Structures are given as structure tokens and as C-alpha cells.
Amino acid sequence: MRYQFPRCRLARAGTPFFPGVLAYTATAPWQYGTEGAVPTVNIVVCVKQVPETSAKKEITADFRLNRPELEAVINPFDEYAIEESLRLKEQHGGEVTVLTMGPESAEDTIRKALAMGADTGVLVTDPALEGTDAWGTAYVLGQALQRLRYDIVMTGMESTEARTGLVPAALAQQVALPALTYAQAVSLQDGKVRINRQIPGGYQEVEADLPVLISVVKGVNEPRYPSLKGIMAARRKEVRRFSLADLQIEPPSVGATGAREQVVAATPRAERTAGEKISGTPEEIAIRIADFLADQKFI
Amino acid sequence: MPDILIYVEHDGGQPHRSALELASGAAPLAADLGGNVIALALGNGAGSTADTLGQYGVTDLYTNENAVFDEYLSAPQIEILAKVVEETHPQAVLLPYTQDGKDVGSGLSARLSAGAVANVVNVKPEDGRLEALETIFGGQYTTTIDVVNSPVAIFLVRANAFPVEQRQQTVTTHHVEYQPSPAATRARKGRVVQEEGAPTPVDEAAIVVSGGRGLGGPEPFEMLGELAEALGGVVGASRAAVDAGWISYPHQVGQTGRTVKPQLYIAIGISGAVQHRVGMQTSDTIIAINKDADAPIFALADLGAVGDLFQIVPALTAEIRRRKGA
């Protein structure tokens, strides 16, 4: 199904990109569908580099994660967001841009997404970003998005490391997009996005006209593995860099100084000690467990 | 103002348990600050939440029953919440750490440039301010967070963080004037499709009965469902069981699923890989049933049963039913 989508002509024409120059900002949805049918959709997928999921995360004396010591991977939830972006691109045409904020090493995360099939990457990196909180992350990504072309901003539902789940909806608010969150299915037709939003025991359909922000849950798809060809191609793809100066952000407004959340103490969890271990016939065990539950007032 | 504003989730005027927990937790804090617990409830039936909220210490209820709150996702809620915050100047806004709560709370954070703390397990007064205790890395650490540089502190509070406690108050209801902006009415809610009967999310339940690889297939989850029902809990699962397609993703507990902190967690046929443990290790009480006496899950369990789950679980369900019936 083709739909009316004038903005994409801009995209096709390949608006030159200059850091700090407003290349394109999302237009109001009611301006879509006027004339010029070009059935493509541009997507910016936001990803994050996180410690490998089984890595031993620790808090350092200055209340930071011991990140440099840990093996880094792409946030597993973001792989679903990348896959969903690639599927929409395959159905509708357009370009997938990978956006991340992080240290220089986060380029690896972008390369992984490029190897999966994304077209281009943007790394927001600046020493002054260290210690940025959820609010600041959404703010910085929002400033970067203002310099990119998109009809859809795609994210995972949360990162496996901070696990706040706050960035998607905050980012939507920063760039004035409707937030279609917790999508377990995504479809696009006639410039309208419909998701099945995961709710307890089922889902609710939610729809909005482009442009939108979508956050996806695990299981929305089966993320592809990068092919050898994809890995080779990724090496040649462009990864642009934004500094805070490029984004016209004053360094003190983000990073640890600008953070709205300040960690004042961190207490490691007291190690759990193993309790009693029981064995016997199933009936004996059942009675022992039931006694335990009764002692604890569960029954 | 030293008030604390709670964001009420409700079904047609029936407050969710989260609202009672937030009110109960906020009452002593507000008293400490010299203020009140005020509440915001929106949409169909919002005004009817007053009676129940009054029993848990709420003195002022702000409402608007405009259908826009039931028809559109999060954006109108963020707008009106921002308006109420600007008019009432509370010290903190407490929201439940649910999908909707996260969307509204983080949207408010961006709108007001205010700090939002997720995974809050407690809030404490400190020199006339409020500090949040946040659990991170699956409960590996608890951090104390000060919200600074912000017009208001936003706390997203985990289920079961505050015990429910009755404190009778007389509630004054205030209607909030609100006209949604065009930007707030874009994400339109549609049809609800219920695929399963159990509507309590695994991270909000007081009792979770989880199954893993040891179940060997989808059918044994019915047996777990019966045990969960006998205890008044819900069914959870390990990643292995979800990835095998035996049960749907919303049941998953662990690093790439939900983090739970129920009063009781029963791990059945779950070996206890790190990826699972970080999702449940802060549960108040843990029981493990596994045939492998060396399974790492036993290191966390307050009570560990070594044996055949296929025999123990039905026997346990029968024993619980017998005692409850007695």
C-alpha cells in the first residue's frame, strides 16, 4: 500500500548534513498526505552500549558503574528495535539511522547495528557527558534528533543495565512526538502507525499518524544476526560524531553536573544465605513446604 | 509546598492497589514535611476514587473525568499532571512503576526538566527534603538518590514498596480545568485484546510461582497455574521457558524480563542462572524446588526442596487447598 508522504522527497534528495545545522525537524502530522506519493519511511533507532548481561556490575567509590572493566555489548532490548526498523525499511523503503550516546567505544554498538543492515550511524560523544542521568540522556538525544531526518524514532523498552525504562517516553516529550510504547507488534499503512501495546494478559491497539516514537518489547520479532557481507559493508558505512558543541548544549547542563538525580549513597545487597534444604517423598516435601508457608502466614 | 502528590491508577473509580500503597507511604512523609497527601485521578470514574483514597490518608483529590484520558495514551495525562504540579507545588510526585506510570512520570520529567527516579523501593525525609532509595542491577545495590536542579522530585515506586495502612481523612475534591492540546491527542487507544485470564503483572504480584527449563514443555505451566491460584499468586517464568515458547514474554522474570520483589517467590525447575537471579533475588521469601541438589538457585532459597517437581507441585497444591479449606 502506498501512502502520501511529501517529506521523503527531502530525504531522497539527500539533504546534506552539517553538524549543528538543522537538517530536518519532524513536521506536524496533519501536514502529511498532501501530495507526492513516495512510500518511504526514515527511521532513527536509538541504541545503547551496556555491559554484557552476566557481567558483575559494581558501583565504584564515586558512585559510577565499573563500566571500563566490563565487556560491552549492544543492549539486548535494542536489537528488537533495530530489527523492527529494518523490517519497516524493507517494506516501505527509506533509511535507518542508528543513534547512540556514549564513549568512543560505543561506535562498536553502532557498527553492530550497521552490520545488521542499518544505513548510517550517529555517535554523540563528549567527555562532559559522563554521569548523565535519564533526564539528560533524553535531552541530549532529543537535541541530536533535531538534526536528523526521521518519520519514526524507534527504541527498545529499556536498557538491561540502568533498567529505568524512562528514556523512551521522556525522549518523545523532548521532541514532541506521540509515544507508542511497549509495542509487541508494529504496522505502518497510509502514514499511520498502529502498534499492539503490551498490557497485562494481552494487548491494546494504539495508533497515531507519523511522525511517532515507538518503543518495542522483547519478542516483537526475532532479531537477525549480521551476515558476513553485512559486517564487511558496515566497515564502509558512515558514522558521524556529535559533540556537545555540535548540539549547542552547554556542558554544565548535562553530565554529572547537570544531572537531576544525584547518588549520595550506595549499599551492596546483603548476600542471601541459603536456608534449609529438604528431601523426602513428594508428600513429605509438600507438607514441609506447606508448614513453612503457614509459619510465614502465606496460608 | 510540603505536600506529596500521588498519581492514582484506577479502573472506573476503583483505585488500584498501587494507589493505596502510594497513599500509605506518602502519609508519614507528608506529615514529616508538614504537608498533606494530595492525589490526581483522571478519566472515567476518577471522582469516585475519593472515598477509598480518604481511608488511606489522602486529603485532597484533583480530578478530571474528560474522556480524553481514556481515549489517548499518556500525553494528556502528562499535560494535566504538569498543570497540577505547577498549581499545587508539591515536594514530590509519586507514581506507580508500571508501564503507564513510567510513561507519564518520565514524560513529566522531560516536560518540567525535573529529575525522575525509577525503581524506588523507599522514600525517606532528610533535612526537609525527600530521598529515594532505588534498587539497581537487579537488587545488587540500593542507591540513595537526591533529586536536584528540579522544580519537583518524581518518584516511580515499585509495587510492594510501601505496606498499605489505613488512615481516615476527609477528602476535598477539586475539579481541574483542562483543555488538551492538539499534540496530546495523537496516540489514540483502540481495541483491547485479552489473551490470558491473569491480569496481574508479574512485577506487581505479592506471590509469584515461576517455572523454568525443568518443566520440559508448556503443559506443566498449568500445574504451576493451579499452585499459583491456590496461593493467590501469579505465574512467572525463566528466560529458558519463554525462549522455548512454553509461556509468553510478559511472564519472564530476569535480566531481559521483569524484575520482581514479591513477598513470596517459588522457583520451580529453575537452576538459577545470574540472568534469572538478578530479576528475583530481592524477593522477601524464596522457595526453590529442583531435582538437582547443586542448582545455584538453592543458594538464594530460604527453603529448598530437592526432588521431582512433577510430583511435589501437585502434592503441594493439594496440601495448600486442604489447609485453606480446613
Image (cartoon, coloured by chain):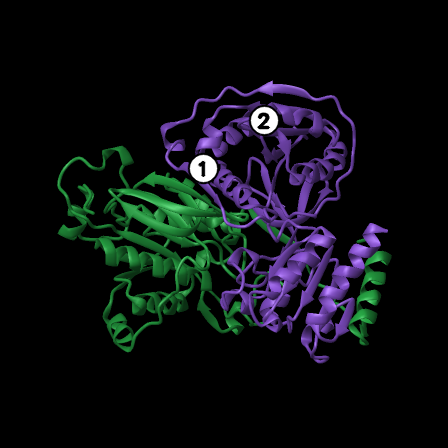
Relative horizontal placement of residue A253, taking residue A176 as reference (left or right): right
Residue pictured at 48% horizontal, 22% vertical:
B178
Q: Which mark is residue B46?
A: 2
Residue pictured at 27% horizontal, 72% vertical:
A230
Question: With respect to residue B86, does B298 lie above or below?
Answer: below
Question: With respect to residue B242, does A207 lie above or below?
Answer: above
Estimate the spatial distance between the alpha carbons at disc 2 and disc 1, rounded to whole Å.
Answer: 17 Å
Whether marks 2 and 1 lie on the same chain = yes
Q: Decide which of A36, B154 is in the foreground and name it.
A: A36
Residue A231 visible, this angle: yes
- Which residue bears the numbered disc 1? B73
Nearer the N terminus, badge 2 or badge 1? 2
- Chain ID at mark 2: B
Q: Do the residues bearing badges 2 and 1 touch, measured as CB atoms within 8 Å?
A: no
Relative horizontal placement of residue A133, taking residue B18 as reference (left or right): left
Secondary element at image label 1: loop
- Chain ID at mark 1: B
Residue pictured at 83% horizontal, 65% vertical:
A287
Q: Residues within 10 Å of mark 2 (few under 14, many from 20)?
A: many
Q: Quadrant of the N terminus of chain B?
A: top right
**Colour purple maps to chain:** B
Residue A28 visible, this angle: no
**Colour green maps to chain:** A
Report x, y in % for residue A27: 26, 38
Q: Which mark is residue B2?
A: none
Q: Amino acid at mark 1?
A: Leu
